[in-house]
Amino acid sequence: MIDTPHTLEVRRSLGRFLSAHAPRLSRGDAVVCGVSGGGDSLALAAACVHAGLDVTTVTVDHGLQDGSAQVARDAARTCRVLGATARTVRVQVAGSGEADARDARYRALGECADGRPVLVAHTADDDAEGLLLALARGSGTGSLAGLREVTDDHPVVTAGAGWLGRPLLHATRADTLGSCAELELDVWHDPHNSSATILRSRVRNELLPLAREILGEHVGDALARSARLLREDADLLDDQARRVLSDVGGAAPATLPVGAVAGRPAPLRRRVLRQWLGARVGPLTSRHLEALDALIADWHGQGAVALPYPATGSPSAPSQTSTMGGTRRLVVRRRRTATGSQLVLEQEDRTP
């Protein structure tokens, strides 16, 4: 028997995922695997076929690099040899950034899935890198937390997938690349992954190797484990925040009773505020949340807290232009009512 330790690790991670999420997914079920042609996604596709899933791979050609169409064709051919049904999809990317390409890719994957789950090949290394990047930004638990194994709240689901799964979070990039070598699969190496102009690439290729040299070869595993534990903590707090909001009518109302939140621990208050505001406002920073929390826990008559608008084109984005020719801003202020103090989300006119 050929020695295939890396392939066994990849299959073990997938098996753990299938056991944890049965009967949501089991042998013979149809899935869509996002396959770029890189080592992570090819190893995932091979493991899914081996596990008896009915695999369709989708390779998205963003058209942003020379030869991208050939890379997509080569990836699809490899997937067919593995025993999967393989598709390639060419997309138009609205901008030139990584986020624009990612949005286009997830939209294409969701449309191709048409109700089937989409599996993607994030590994423990992605969690380790994400944790380091979040630490550098001074982020809270929600951002430090690792990727979810399964989520129903994701752009790929909005675009048509049943749900999104990440079966390889207990495998490493060394495992996926090693598995491809063991299975003699031709791997495409994305030049962006070694670009010194991309911060995540520098963390991957410079910072983590240095950390392994100083702190030991298993530091990546330790970081990934920390990210998973933080995910559990973050999900617990988020669930508690949803319960608080449910008791006062959910996240939709434009008012939040101060009494429902006052006296609760600060981490829970901030999560309630974030969920209450949701997609009706733009990205909230720690400064926004501190100012909002002060309206509850440190109230001394201060004025409204100005918040960013959602992205232009968002279904929840209100008009920012006043009928009087001025502009509006989105604010939360504290008001005293007959039923007690409330936080109120509203637009405020600002004249020129």
Image (cartoon, rainbow, N blue to C red):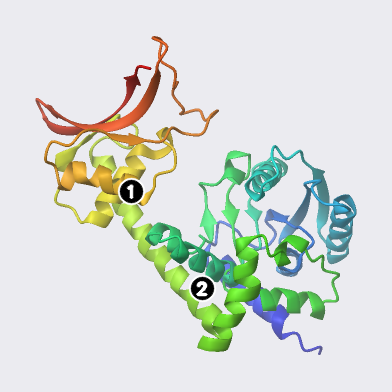
- Marker disc for residue 224: 2
The quarter of the image holding the N terminus is bottom right
Residue found farthest to the front: 352
Q: Judge left or right: residue 51 versus residue 17.
A: right
Placement of 274 over or under 232, stated as above or below: above
Element on which disc 1 rests: helix
Q: Judge left or right: residue 35 versus residue 338.
A: right
Give the residue displayed 82% in from the left and 77% down from the top.
183
Determine which quarter of the picture holds residue 193: bottom right
Placement of 153 over or under 347, stated as above or below: below
Give the residue displayed 68% in from the left and 78% down from the top.
174
Give the number of callouts: 2
Q: Find disc 1 in the rendering and name its residue.
A: 287
Element on which disc 2 rests: helix
Q: Residue 132: horizontal and vertical position, in percent?
A: 50, 68
Placement of 77 over or under 109, stated as above or below: below
- Label 1 environment density (alpha carbons within 10 Å; few <14, some 14–19, many ≥20): few
Q: Residue 326: horizontal and vertical position, in percent?
A: 40, 16
Q: Residue 260: horizontal and vertical position, in percent?
A: 18, 42
Q: Nearer the viewer, residue 181 or 311?
A: 311
Q: Marks 2 and 1: in contact by CB < 8 Å?
A: no
Q: Nearer the viewer, residue 76 or 281?
A: 281
- Label 2 environment density (alpha carbons within 10 Å; few <14, some 14–19, many ≥20): many
What type is the residue that disc 2 sits on?
A: Ala
Judge depth for marks 1 and 2 and give the one in front: 1
